[in-house]
Amino acid sequence: MDRSQKAEEILDVAERMTRAGGYGGFSFREIATEVGIKSASVHYHFPTKEDLGAAMAERYTDRFLKGLGDPRDTTRSTEEKISAYVEGFRQALVEDDLMCLCGVLGAEIAGLPVRVAEQARRFFDRNREWLDAVYEADGGYGDVTARHNTALALLAKLEGAMLVARSFGDNEVFDQVMSV
Amino acid sequence: MDRSQKAEEILDVAERMTRAGGYGGFSFREIATEVGIKSASVHYHFPTKEDLGAAMAERYTDRFLKGLGDPRDTTRSTEEKISAYVEGFRQALVEDDLMCLCGVLGAEIAGLPVRVAEQARRFFDRNREWLDAVYEADGGYGDVTARHNTALALLAKLEGAMLVARSFGDNEVFDQVMSV
DNA sequence: AAATGTCTGCCTATCAGTAGGTAGGCTTCA
DNA sequence: TGAAGCCTACCTACTGATAGGCAGACATTT
């Protein structure tokens, strides 16, 4: 996907608004005003809201995974990989004082257009796969089922930590949760 | 708060719609149609959407806490209390195939009207207090900070487990997360 | 070099539909 | 009598979306 600079700007604004107020938290007109064009021109870049939402979630997941690197990288220990993984979530929270995009979308997934919901789910699929690969490469995390559950548990704890931290309006809550 | 039966019906429908699609997932017109009156009559019971949203979240929290019982109840062990607590979340998920109401609201709290956001936050406050009381009554969970963090961690894990389970469209994920 | 056609990116103007919200009137029941 | 509960009828503001057009860049053809 190579997009124009304007299209990237549109996704930037949409992402910020969604992370603050959910899928209903952005409108074509609001985005248009912020990026300095008209709402009809936003439709030029993304024909429908579903297109925009799906592209936004896809880009978010791709960027997030790219930041994680290779889960089977032998130059890093399992502990290093996992603590870098947790750090990825903390950054998403602390840098912008906002929730994880796909966490927000996941919370309201039953009300999302299909292609947006698919992309939200894809985030969780890929994350579970990445963690599973780390645990498998380590070898000390039991069988498939055990690794699967361990991966899901970390993922859930991280999303929950962000959600609770944002609900309390206090990012330190994230670290307090993760310290246990 | 004693409300008319119609007002309770309205809150029932609003709650279900919010748990599926977030705060923007319900409208006065949709609710009105479902409960068999006109949207102007919904405004009679709840003058503004913020009123409705706040009442909905308040009722949800009150009911949830009532279901938990006394955290200092000496006839139940700490293990019994905590497993009953987890069961409360599981029921909310499995019975309706929906996310926790205040989990949904918490995820988009930055975009909510103030009084709705306050009520969402109240859910987490009360839950943390309840867990803290259980741990304090037990005596074996360390000092205030340790109890505080333990309570937050369980709360976050439960909310995260629901969120991830709903995102995968598979309630078994909840149990897989909680098994770790 | 000039003319032609095509593409990008944006515009104005407008659409039907829906949002939350209000004024005022009718009916029912204590 | 008056309050409760609901109605009709309406408002303004905004939603996502479409039609049609226009300026400029670029490439192709003559």
Image (cartoon, coloured by chain):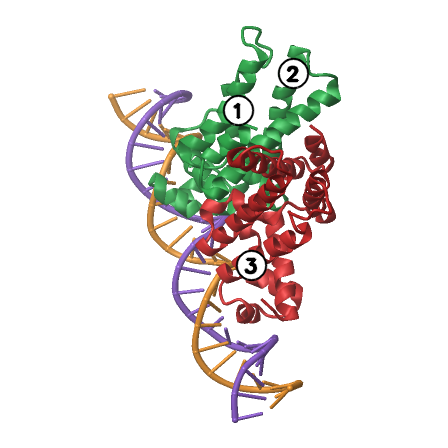
Chain colours: A green, B red, C orange, D purple
Residue B114 vs D24, above or below: the answer is: below
Residue visible at 73% across and 45% down in the picture: B76
Is residue B97 or residue A117 the one in the foreground? B97
Chain ID for label 2?
A: A
- Regarding residue A136, the answer to whether it shows in the image is yes
Residue visible at 60% across and 11% down in the picture: A72
Structural crowding at the residue carrying mark 2, measured as other residues with C-alpha within 10 Å and reported as few (<14), some (14–19) or many (≥20):
many
Q: Earlier in the sequence, mark 1 or mark 2?
A: 1
Question: Secondary structure under badge 1?
Answer: helix
Quadrant in which the C terminus of chain B appears? top right
Quadrant in which the N terminus of chain B appears? bottom right
Question: Secondary structure under badge 3?
Answer: loop
How far from the left and from the top, in percent, is residue B8?
Answer: 64, 65
Q: Label 1, label 2: how many angstroms apart (C-alpha)?
A: 15 Å
Residue visible at 49% across and 20% down in the picture: A67
How far from the left and from the top, in percent, is residue B109?
Answer: 49, 46
* Residue that numbered label 3 is attached to: B27
Structural crowding at the residue carrying mark 1, measured as other residues with C-alpha within 10 Å and reported as few (<14), some (14–19) or many (≥20):
some
* Residue that numbered label 2 is attached to: A135
Chain ID for label 1?
A: A
Is residue A55 or residue C24 the one in the foreground? C24
Chain ID for label 3?
A: B
* Residue that numbered label 1 is attached to: A86
